[in-house]
Image: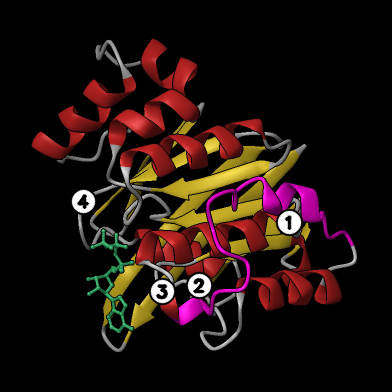
Amino acid sequence: MKALETSGLGKRYRRRWALQDSTIELPAGAMAALVGPNGAGKTTLLNLVTGLLTPTTGRVRVFGRPLEVTKVAFVGQDKPLYRRWSVNDMLRFGAATNSRWDRGRAESLLHDIPYGERVDRLSGGQRTLVALALAVGKRADLLVLDEPLAELDPLARVQVMGVVRGLETTVLLSSHILADLAEVCDHLILLGAGRVRLCGSFTDLLNSHPAATMEDLVLDYLRNPEPAR
Ligand SMILES: Nc1ncnc2c1ncn2[C@@H]1O[C@H](COP(=O)(O)OP(=O)(O)OP(=O)(O)O)[C@@H](O)[C@H]1O
């Protein structure tokens, strides 16, 4: 079963294409790393597969059906939270708006967060954890995370990656931190200049490329960015 399929997906802003002709397949249960240089189109792709942007071309299917936002949880780079609410308010909101809400799973990310504190008084890293907790508690079929590790300290990163690794769901995760991705993920989507350059399982990709590790494979592409497929 394919958790995520895109075909011919593209997005154009005025005359400029941010993403073109992107065809991706992720099997159910995949933990996929989305990587690529700055401006490659990663955020655009994530916004398209979560329904935040409308494609200019192509289509998105989640578990064989047209995209339904209730089936997808997204944590974007701007971590949209109600900033005047407390963490407790956010958890109550999660419970009230999601029929499959799992408070225990959400709380597993919030050990060191004061529940009574207003969201706008938390650190950037703490806000990331609250946003992730809400997404994880939703128990969506597909969890999409745009640079979730960017503001986290090393311990919080280990904690977040541990939680993500333990989820029984399909995850698509963008980050520039290759070491973390290589440890947690089993699939790679590599974007370059608005196009998909590589898409597949680590095993298949490494079987068909000379690189010894996923990090080497990505670094080879970044150093020498011709189309790799
Ligand atoms: N709202 C917008 N209007 C016009 N151009 C945009 C818009 N959003 C993105 N772009 C352009 O689309 C291209 C892809 O941007 P995108 O943010 O998807 O890249 P990215 O891979 O996520 O980059 P980064 O790693 O720096 O976050 C860039 O050239 C960017 O300037």
Mark 3 or mark 4, whichever is nearer to me: 3
Q: Is residue 181 above or below residue 66?
A: above
- Residue lying at 67% horizontally and 74% vertically, measured from the top left: 90
Residue 37 — which label? 4
Residue 64 in view (yes/no): no
Amino acid type of the residue tagged 4 in the rendering: Pro
Indicate the quadrant where residue 25 lies: top right
- Please report whichever mark, 2 or 3, sits nearer to the chain's N-terminal start: 2
The residue that label 3 is drawn on is 78
The residue that label 1 is drawn on is 137
Specify the quadrant that holds the N terminus. Answer: top right
- 3D distance between C-alphas at marks 4 and 2: 23 Å
The residue that label 2 is drawn on is 57
Assign a secondary structure to mark 1.
helix
Mark 2 or mark 3, whichever is nearer to me: 3
- Residue lying at 42% horizontally and 24% vertically, measured from the top left: 183
Q: Residue furthest left?
A: 223
Q: Main secondary structure of the magenta part?
A: loop
Assign a secondary structure to mark 2.
strand
Q: Is residue 203 above or below residue 198?
A: above
Indicate the quadrant where residue 137 lies: bottom right
Specify the quadrant that holds the C terminus. Answer: top left
